[in-house]
Amino acid sequence: MQQDQNGQDDDLFLVDDESGNESEDKHLLFRLSDEEYGVPIDRVQSIEELQRIVAVPDMPHYVRGVINLRGTVIPVVDLRLRFGMPAREYDDRTCIIIIEADSRVVGFIVDTVSEVHQIPAKNIQPAPEFRSGSGSEQFVTGLGTVEGEVKILLEIDRLMRPEEVPEQALTLGKAQMQSTVAAGENG
């Protein structure tokens, strides 16, 4: 059982609204603006406080840069920007959800994390079949109902594809982090 940064067991955030404990039914719910979204809990590695992000040149506008998480350089995506929402100033509730997406570990910046909810398949409707004019892939895998409210369930592998943040960018980000640390030690 993992513990969060305050030493509390992650299971304390689990709201079990159905009997049965299949992990594929459990979703981490988070907010962006007034909407609540969910990602499969078995893909979530951790929830981190917002920390220093090193900008990397020539990345899409929604890729804010990289972070150094316990010695691993991880690209970070602002989901508000990824979804075409207006940017907002980060605050003390803003966090980074560390997720395994498309065989790569990625951080997603969200407004706030809500809780873990069990959403059985019977409470999930398929995603609507419409696309934006941009031709981008659809990110929504389904619409889940929790206590009468709709939660937007995301297809996380489509949120961040490897070609959007090439390995060269991660190498550059790591080098920038190391030079910043070295400058701080020598200064």
Image (cartoon, rainbow, N blue to C red):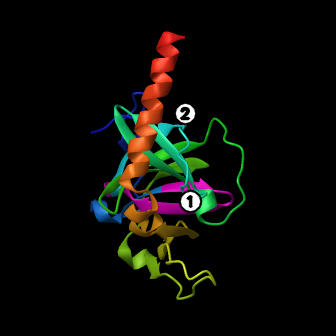
In the picture, the disc for residue 60 is: 1
Give above or below for 134 relative to 177.
Answer: below
Identify the magenta region: 29-42
52 lies left or right of 103: right
**Closer to the camera in the image, 36 or 67:** 67
Say whether residue 153 is visible: yes
104 lies left or right of 77: left
Q: Which residue is mark 2?
A: 52
Q: Is residue 39 magenta?
A: yes
Q: Position of residue 7 (x, y in %)?
A: 39, 27
Q: Residue at x 49, y 11 (%)?
A: 186
Give above or below for 40 relative to 70.
Answer: below
**Closer to the camera in the image, 102 or 154:** 102
Q: What type is the residue that disc 1 sits on?
A: Pro
Q: Residue at x 57, y 51 (%)?
A: 110
Q: Quadrant of the C terminus?
A: top right
Q: Residue furthest bottom?
A: 129
**Closer to the camera in the image, 146 or 63:** 63
Q: Is residue 36 magenta?
A: yes
Which label's residue is closer to the chain start, 1 or 2?
2
Q: Position of residue 9 (x, y in %)?
A: 36, 36
**Closer to the camera in the image, 125 or 73:** 73
Q: Position of residue 106 (x, y in %)?
A: 41, 51
Give above or below for 171 relative to 166.
Answer: above
Q: Residue at x 53, y 46 (%)?
A: 56
Callout 2: 10 Å neighbours few (<14), some, many (20+)?
few
Callout 1: 10 Å neighbours few (<14), some, many (20+)?
some
Q: Residue at x 43, y 61 (%)?
A: 39
Q: What type is the residue that disc 2 sits on?
A: Arg
